[in-house]
Image: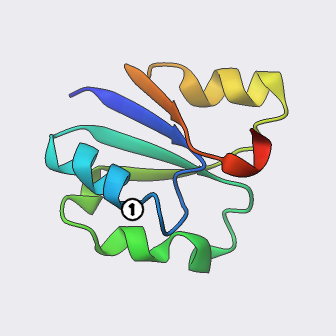
């Protein structure tokens, strides 16, 4: 199975993108700044094929953390408009 990493993919706007990849049989890794704040991503756990969804804590300003998050990904999408 292919893996897509979506940086900033825990937002409400991004659920369409996450759903698109889940429905195309991808494993989907999304990032969140604070994994303890489940309210930021719990809505994604209700998507179809959410068993292939993985939530990872990530501070994208730390290069080593970014490298670790993207390792093994076939596709990486950056969806964090606050950092553009």
Say whether residue 34 is left or right of residue 17: right
Residue 59 visible in this rendered orientation of the protein: no
Where on the picture, by quarter, is residue 45?
Answer: bottom left
**Coloured how?**
rainbow
Residue 63 visible in this rendered orientation of the protein: yes
From the image, tell me which residue sits under label 1.
15
Residue 31 percent across, percent down from the top left: 59, 48
Where on the picture, by quarter, is residue 7?
Answer: top right
> Callout 1: helix, strand or loop?
helix
Which residue is pictured at 16% across the width and 50% down the height? 23
Say whether residue 43 is left or right of residue 39: left
Where on the picture, by quarter, is residue 3?
Answer: top left
Residue 42 percent across, percent down from the top left: 47, 75
Task: Decide which of 83, 46 is in the foreground and name it.
Answer: 83
Which residue is pictured at 73% across the width and 56% down the height? 33
Which residue is pictured at 28% across the width and 50% down the height? 52
Task: Decide which of 12, 35 is in the foreground and name it.
Answer: 12
> Around disc 1, counting alpha carbons within 10 Å, would you say few (fewer than 14), some (14 to 19), or many (20 or more)?
some
Residue 38 percent across, percent down from the top left: 59, 75
Which quarter shows the N terminus? top left
Q: Is residue 72 above or below residue 15?
A: above
């Amino acid at each position: 199975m292919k893996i897509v990493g979506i940086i900033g993919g825990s937002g409400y706007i991004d659920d369409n993108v996450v759903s698109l990849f889940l429905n195309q049989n991808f494993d989907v890794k999304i990032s969140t700044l604070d994994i303890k704040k489940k309210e930021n991503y719990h809505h994604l756990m209700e998507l179809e094929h959410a068993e292939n969804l993985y939530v990872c804590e990530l501070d994208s300003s730390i290069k080593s953390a970014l490298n670790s998050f993207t390792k093994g990904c076939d596709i990486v999408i950056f969806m964090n408009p606050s950092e553009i």
